[in-house]
Amino acid sequence: MFRHTLMAGVATLALLAGPVLAEEPVADKKLERIGISLGTMSNPFFVALARGAEAEAKKVNPDVQVMAFGYDYDIAKQFSQIDNFISAGVDLILLNPADASAIGPAIRRAQEAGIVVVAVDTFAEGADAVVTTNNVQAGEIACQYIVDKLKGEGNVIIQNGPQVSAVIDRVNGCKSALEAAPGITILSSDQDGKGTREGGMNVMQSHLVRFADIDAVFAINDPQAIGTDLAARQQGRSGIIISAVDGAPDIEVALKDAGAVMIEASASQNPYDMARRAVDLGVKVLQGEELAAPVELMDSKLVTRENIADYIGWASDPAVTD
């Protein structure tokens, strides 16, 4: 069902565009239209997030109009999407900000128009609420796995990504785990894999040329981890431990694949439930309720080859698999 919503999103936004009506008293606001701006709709994480938001919104109002778009990590494009949402008179905006600070003025414009703004997956300056994975903890457990597997000694690469708060937190969490082991050497931590499989492959190809001895790689998300594995296999390298963050459907397949044994672990997220919780908080703010905790962190659990059979995954809700 959500596929149809996405395809109709642009047309719906054009039809809805027009002058914003006078702001209603906050307590009387109803959820009728939601605008969603996410990193990229080519990443299944953001697709699951958008579907979770739609599912929760339809519990509140079965006739709610949901418009979800990817900004492809282009902040100018995200600014344009937010301005379009304001013109369309949405009641709630969910966004995964391209830049936590730079997005602040756009958020304020939306709030001045009577729109509630909730950040998902990453923090955003001035948002009414934030729901995200505890990314520091996710990075810690993903890299503690590497430390334990290497018995505290080895050469490790941290494969970085787009500098949003979630990625920065994951890298900081990873570094805290690696730096606590004196026998671990971090060969590189500043190369951007762009959050994609292709980006991860390109960065890993460069690292394989630069470094003859690589024992492990921490990738900031699963697409980069899969690209890293492909690059290593293409160059005939083996014995590299690859750990990441996401717990995405593709990593589930990889953790069960005897041919992709270098991919060993991923600190899981739950984008579907994250988005449902974000909508729930947004509706409370819309109805004038004061939030006890405007920032909510969701703990991550490590998924490995040993426990993958017990992992529920992102496809646990039927809406994710339709």
Image: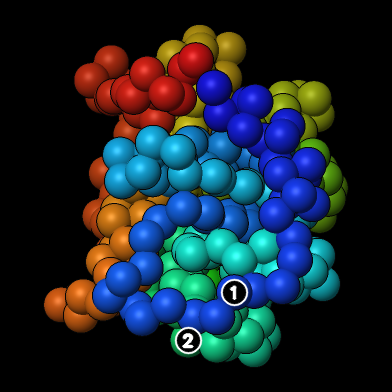
Residue type pointed to by label 1: Leu
| Whole-percent x, y for residue 22 in the image | 55, 80
User: How far apart are labels 1 and 2 at the CA level?
Assistant: 23 Å
- Nearest the viewer among 266 and 261 is 266
Mark seen at residue 21: 1
Mark 1 surroundings: few (<14), some (14-19) or many (≥20) residues within 10 A: few
- Quadrant of residue 109 within the rendered picture: bottom right
Choose top left, top right, bottom left or bottom right for residue 238: top right
Q: Secondary structure at mark 2?
A: loop
Which mark sits nearer the N-terminus, 1 or 2? 1
Amino acid marked by disc 2? Gly
Q: Residue at x 65, y 26 (%)?
A: 4
Front-most of residues 175 and 27: 27
Q: Is residue 9 left or right of residue 220?
A: right
Expressed as whole percent of the image width and height from the top left, the position of residue 13 reads 73, 51
- 198 versus 203 height, above or below: above
Which marked residue is nearer to the observer: mark 1 or mark 2? Answer: 1
Q: Is residue 216 left or right of residue 199?
A: left
Category of crowding for the residue at label 2, using alpha-carbon neighbours closer than 10 angstroms: few (below 14), some (14–19), many (at least 20) = some
Q: Give the SS element for disc 1.
A: loop
Q: What sort of colour scheme is used for the picture? A: rainbow
Residue that numbered label 2 is attached to: 126
